[in-house]
Image: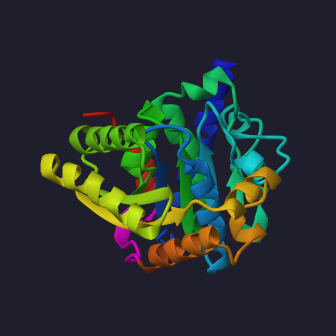
Amino acid sequence: MHNDQAAGLRAMHGSSSSRSTGGGSKPIRVIAVASGKGGVGKTNVSVNLGVALSKLGNRVLLMDADMGLANVDIMLGLQTSYNLSHVLSGEKTLKEVIVEGPAGLKVIPAASGIRRMAQLSLMENAGIVHAFSELADELDVLLVDTAAGIAESVVNFCRAAQEVIVVVTDEPASITDAYALIKVLSRDYQVTRFRILANMSISALQGKQLYDKLARVAEQFLDIQVDFLGSVPQDNALREAVQRQIPVTIHRPQSAAASAFFDIADKINAWPIPRNVTGHLQFFVENLFQKEA
C-alpha cells in the first residue's frame, strides 16, 4: 500500500508540475482555518465561510485537511465515495474525488478514521496539495479546514497558506490553546499574521473583548500582527442547521449567525488581492515542500 501511495505521489507530482510551471496562473487566496482545540466550531466556520464566499461570486474549493476526524462532508450532508486516500494511492485524480456542495462550493473530502492518513509525511501532504495545481485556473479561494491543535499537518498547512484564521471561543482552554498554536506558528515557522474569529459569542461586544484579550497577550510576547476578523453569535438557527446537515448560510440566510458569516466573507473579499508568485497555488505547494528549519 505504501509503495502504491509513493507511486501515486510521483505521478501526481510529475503531471501537475508540468502544468503549473507556466506563468499564466491567476492569484488565488489560500486560507487555513485552524483552532487550538477541538469543539470550538472550526469546521462549521469553514463550511459556512465557504458557502458565503461562493454566494459572493467566488469559485471556492474547501479542502477537509483533518485527516483523523474528517467531517466537512457530514456537515454538508454529502455522500462521498472517494477521498484523499484514493488520490494518494493513485487510484483517482483530484478532480475525480471533488464533490459539489451547496451554492457551487466544491469539496475535497478527507479520509476519516484511517490512521495512515492522520500521519502523512511532509512530502505526502505536499503531494496532495501539489495535485491542486491543475485546478489553479478554476479557483479563486482555497479554504483549508485543518485539524484542531498543533499536529504536524496543521503546522504545514498554516505556514504555507497566505492567511491563517484562528477560531476561538470564550473559555479558558480555547484561549490558552489558541495562544499556544499562534506561538508555535510564529516562533518556529515565521507566520507573522493571524486573523482571529470569535465563535459562539454571546454578543458582538463579548467577541471583541475575547479578541482583545488574546491579542494583548500575543502582541506583548510575540512579534506578530493579530487582526479581529469578526464574531459569530450563539444562534439556535445554527444548531438547527447543523442537525439538518445544511449550512446555516443556506438553511437560514437571514439569521444572526448567517449574517455574521456573510459579513466576515465580505471582509475576506476586501483583503488585498495576492500579487506575484505568493498568490499562486504553486507557492503554497513549494512552501509545503520546504524542510523544517
Residue 202 in the image: above or below residue 121: below
Image location of residue 22, percent across then percent down: 49, 65
Q: Is residue 21 visible?
A: no
Nearest the camera: 28 or 189?
Answer: 189
Image location of residue 98, percent across then percent down: 74, 53
Using residue 173 as the reference point, say whether residue 95 is left or right of it.
right
Q: How is the image coloured?
A: rainbow
Image location of residue 18, percent across then percent down: 55, 54
Q: Is residue 218 visible?
A: yes
Residue 254 in the image: above or below residue 292: below
Residue 199 in the image: above or below residue 173: below
Count of residue discs? 0
Nearest the camera: 77 or 206?
Answer: 206
Image location of residue 61, percent across then percent down: 63, 60
> What residue appears at the point 77 percent right and 68 percent down from the top-left corner?
251
Quarter-of-image position of residue 273: bottom left
Nearest the camera: 232 or 6?
Answer: 232
- Quarter of the image with the C terminus is top left
Q: Which residues are magenta?
A: 271-281
- Quarter of the image with the N terminus is top right
> What residue appears at the point 78 percent right and 51 percent down from the top-left corner?
243
Quarter-of-image position of residue 39: top right
Which residue is situated farthest in the front direction here?
202
> What residue appears at the point 14 percent right and 51 percent down from the top-left corner?
220
| Residue 274 magenta | yes
